[in-house]
Image (spheres, grey):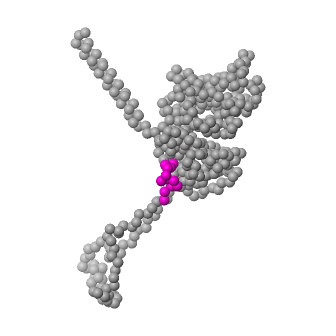
Amino acid sequence: MNRTSSRNLYRTGLFSVICALLVGGGAWAQLAKRTAKSKGPRALGLVEILTNGKARMQTICIMVDGRFFDAGTYKATPVPMAVAPETVYEGTRNGVSIGLYTIADARSARSSWFGEGKWVPTGSEPKRVPAITSTKRVDEEEAPPILRRADSPTAKAEQTKPAETKSSNSGPALPTGADTPPKLKKDSKDTTPPATTVPMAPGAGERPVLRRGKPGEGQQKFEDKDFASTAPVKELFLAVSDAGGPEPRSYVLLAKPDEVVAYRRKLESMASDTVRALYGVKPDARRKTASVAFTHAQMQTLDLTNSNDPVLVFTATVDPAEKTLGPAHATVSVVARVDIYGELRKLLAEATDDHHLDVYPKLEFLDAADADGDGSGELVFRETSDNGRGFVVYRAGLDKVWTLFDSLRNY
């Protein structure tokens, strides 16, 4: 190898190293911008706006030092920490902040804990009116000196004004010397007023607290019927309370229309296979379509890790017209991840009905939220089994979902 070839190889290698350093430096810069993971406490709840305008919040879970606990029982002395008065929750929808919910009181109902509070949506805060400060009147004696001419009317008036003596306005002479009454001496070191003591939050000196604030005025009065399961709900959303943690961000991933159609078709095929497996039914070759008929089908495309890595959530109800699949009221939930080849990788697929709730709970997808405070989103479902209703929080992995919290299974 001649000297010219060696020089070219050296230049090429040097250029590759520089490019690698630049790319690595950019990655390190992105990692440096990430907010440190929250150590907690970080509480997660479900806010429900009733048709009468009242807002109640049901506890879900609380994370402390990376471990999840049931928010309805954690630090319940006697009220759980998650619903302590003046605790502030930030409501989110698809990861975006939509307002603040401040708890005024707590109530136990239906084997769970609820918060009674006030919901203030973003943009509805009253505008603050600037305070009017009064200008202090300055007397002539305190005013700065003013130069006046000798021939000015003001100067002539001061010359003609009779001089006032202190003896004319003074009172009786005060005793001096030994006849002077005793006086209390003030210590120059104690001239500053005593510092005011700020009342601490309940239990603040014994345990860490969540985000706190005042509920404000206009607090509504709650009744027992407002916490019944039959109370009509107008809207619901997840809410997070944390004194620190990362800022909320959107988890919505906008896909192309043709990609949405292709994703939905594949998800319906996965859901159909899951429903047939529940009842042990094989696909009917005489049908034009292999998919089961669904109603109330919903699909969401999410970017949980801020890496443009799509995670799809599909939920639907089996059409009652599907008589060959068993009883009505069957539901199905599917979670899938799109790999680098555009194919769907199934992470979770569960179907159930009223007769299989003891084995397969019914899953109702609520939303994605940052439950552990690491900046990434987790999938939050409300589950219904023969033992009651609860919540489950999943983390979407590469091949399956990992259970972070399950209130019905004490996980």
Magenta-colored stretch includes residue 208: yes
Q: Return the residue nearer the eye: 310 or 226.
A: 226
Image quadrant containing the C terminus: top right
* Residue 249 visible in the picture: no
Give left or right: position of 212 versus 15: right
**Over which residues does the magenta segment extend?**
199-210
* Residue 38 visible in the picture: yes
Identify the residue shown where x is 48% and y is 47%.
243
Quadrant for residue 153, please give it: bottom left
Residue 10 locus on image (x, y percent): 27, 18
Quadrant for residue 220, please give it: bottom right
- The answer to whether 76 is drawn above or below residue 382 in the figure is below
Identify the residue shown where x is 65% and y is 34%.
363
Identify the residue shown where x is 53% and y is 36%.
377
**Dominant secondary structure of the residues highlighted in magenta in the image:** loop
Residue 338 locus on image (x, y percent): 54, 25
Give left or right: position of 327 versus 33: right
Magenta-colored stretch includes residue 284: no
Identify the residue shown where x is 62% and y is 36%.
409
- The answer to whether 315 is drawn above or below residue 154 in the figure is above
Q: Return the residue nearer the eye: 308 or 132.
A: 308
Residue located farthest toward the left when viewing the structure as drawn: 3
What count of labels does the image hold?
0
Image quadrant containing the N terminus: top left
Residue 270 locus on image (x, y percent): 63, 24
